[in-house]
Image: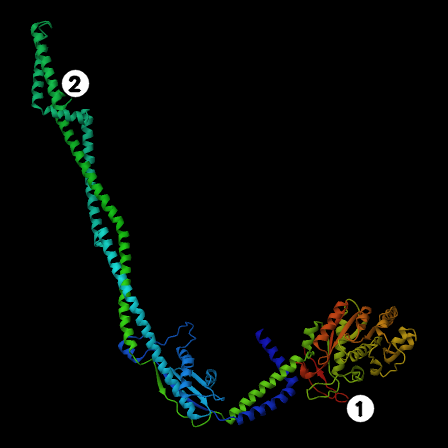
Amino acid sequence: MESQESSLSVDKYWQVLKRRWVPGLAAFFPVFLLALLSSSLKKPTYIAEGKLLFQRTDTISSLTGLGTEIGKLESVAQDNKSSPLQTEAEVIRSVPVVQKTIKQLDLRGKDGTALEYEDFLEKLTVKDIAKTDVLKVSYKDNKPQQAAKVVNTLMAAYLEHNVSSRRKAATSAREFIEKQLPQAEAIVNKLEAELARFKEKNKVYALQEEASKSIEVLGNLQTQIGDIKTKLADVSARSQLIRNQLDINSDLALNMTSLNQAAGVQDILKEVQLLESQLTARRTVLKNTHPEIIALESKFSALKSLLQNRIRQTVGVDAQQLDGRLQEGELKQQLAGELVNLESTSVGLTNQLAVLSELQTSYKQRLENLPKLELQQRELERKLEAAQSTYSLLLKKLQETSIAENQNIGNASRVSEALVPQEPVSSPLINYLSASLLGMLVSLATMYLLESQDKSIKTIEEAKELTGLTLLGVIPDFSKPKKSILSKQDSEPAYPTLMVRDAPRSPISEAFRMLRANLKFMSADKELKVIVVTSSVPQEGKSTVAANLATSMAQMERRVLLIDGDLHRPSQHHIWELPNAQGLSNVIVGQVEVMAAIKKGMDNLDVITCGAVPPSPASLLDSKRMASLVESFRSYYDYVIIDAPSLNLAADAATLGQMADGVLLVVRPGVVDSVNAAFACEMLEKSGQNVLGQVVNGVVPKNERHINYYYSQEYPEDNMTTIEAVKVKV
């Protein structure tokens, strides 16, 4: 699609060139001669050249490693399209460097005043040499010595500017660093103090070692707690078993053990048991009232009271609460003692377990808090490290800038000075080329101006695009052209030739027969019998097209009537060489009969000429009489062709179109312009006409790109001159 559009554009320009080459050529030669004369009168111009070499860093900085970043040639843009050399070229062209050169050499302009900056730049050229780090500085002037001096002075001014700019940059950097150093040192001191306070507050020394040691201690504590829990479970089980066997609680077992171990209680208990045995033995032989029995009971009561006091003094409870357990056996007494030991062991293990658990909790809390402390410590250490790094970097840069500030060498050096040129740069060949180029530009501008001012339709494609109507026929130009200085052809001659009648075997006649066939194809549903032929403006050949179309229809042995409906500028009586005393206007007003106005043009073809030109043609054509005439002609003839006046001349064509089956619009390139063609189409559309299509008449071979032409001499010289035969390929 893009190649097709490009081809169309090239063809369009080629057609314009073919149409306008004569005025373009007429504009070329004067401009060419004037430019050549002007260049020959100019003074010769000399160009002096000098070269500057650039290094990414200067040699001293590369050797010492100090100040390498100052004045380093690097591009700021990251698009890989900018070049540091181009940047330096702009510095050479800058106002300070140029103004200094102008002032040193006291350069003057044509008016004797100091040379302007813009005028200096017009003579100056600074460009880089491909694939090198060298800039070429050129200056052109009428004086060769002056050109060389300007180049050398400009390069010297730039080199001085290069060194001074590096010094200024180094000085600014040093002053900035000197201001920043105290602040950087204060930040380092502050962070060191903050890190020390953090370690002191949280008792942080070596967090990694502390974490490892805490994990080890927690493991040992867990092992000890497990052992104690195992022992405690064993003690609890044994004491529970003894309590179940003795059916006593821990307090009672403790009391029993204390009483069993108290000698005073055991002695009295033995006496009570002995006295109780005696009393029981004596009661078997004596009565209770016996004095011996009474004495034994009195002694027994005294011993019981004493035993009660001894028990109360020993364990703090009455003997009755012991529920007769003072006389338990030795085994139970041992079990009671063991129960007391187990209870005391259990209490000891429980206390030990609580202490170990509390210690374990303390270690766990410390271990859980270690990551936070480590994170805080790392953050403080990072800040301190960054501050120390910044401080160290500032110290280093201060040293570099101090050294760079004292250097007198930049990264640019003069490779070669400008020599006085011996030969001027202007030559006859260059003068001829520049004059030719200027002449071509003026020539093209002239052709473009003429083409833009010419609003006429020039080709078939333009006619199709502008009108938007169906193309029914292409009629080549068969008039005798007369070329003027602008290469334009005259309009159709006053008496056009009936090609279809006089040269039926010609390709032009075939074009009219093609038009007839296309009209027949359009009337497949409804037969077209009455056709109005009109145009946008006069001189488009609509009368010629109407006459030849009617002739081609008559050659098909159809009865055809050709009516000259152009009551403004009639021409059919000239074409057919018929008298015009009586015609259509006379029939409409009733001066003559229809049959008297009909004249024979050829076999199967009748012609009604215009007749007398009326003062108001529109009123005659827009009458009932005209409508009835058209209807009567429709019924009698196979085809009725009406030659109507142009649409911009009168509205007669629109009036006749209402009576006809369709309107055929004739468009002639080079005659009608776009304004009149658009007006004609708009008029036909608004009046509701059945526009059949358009016929492009008078096509010039050289103006069309899709039509091939050939020339032949098919007809005898006595009938006509050499005919320009046409072969159409659309």
- On the picture, is 14 further left or further right than 586? left
Q: Can residue 31 be seen? A: yes
Tell me if mark 1 has few (under 14), some (14-19) or many (20+) residues whose alpha carbon lies within 10 angstroms of its own. Answer: few
Horizontally, residue 152 falls left or right of residue 474, namely: left
What residue does disc 2 label? Answer: 320
- Could you say where residue 687 lies in the image, as x and y percent from the top left? 77, 68
Mark 2, other Cα within 10 Å: few <14 / some 14–19 / many ≥20:
few
Which percent across, then down, holds residue 649? 78, 76
State the image quarter where residue 291 is shown.
top left
Could you give the CA–CA distance between mark 2 and mark 1, rounded to whole angstroms? 177 Å
Which residue is at the front of the view, 315 or 523? 315
* Residue found at the very far front of the displayed protein: 113
Please tell me the numbered disc located at residue 518.
none
Residue 541 is situated, as x and y percent measured from the top left of the image, at 77, 80
Which tag is nearer the camera, tag 2 or tag 1? 2
- Residue found at x 74% / y 68%: 685
Name the kind of residue labelled 2 in the image.
Gln
Where, quadrant-wise, is the N terminus in this rendering?
Answer: bottom right
Say left or right for 236 vs 681. left
- Is 668 situated left or right of 573 in this image? left
The reply to whether callout 2 and callout 1 are in contact (CB within 8 Å) is: no
Q: Which residue is mark 1?
A: 718
Inspect the image, locate mark 1, and give the three-letter code of the amino acid beneath it. Answer: Asp
Would residue 211 be seen by someone viewing this image from the given angle? no
Q: How is this picture coloured?
A: rainbow
Secondary structure at numbered mark 2: helix
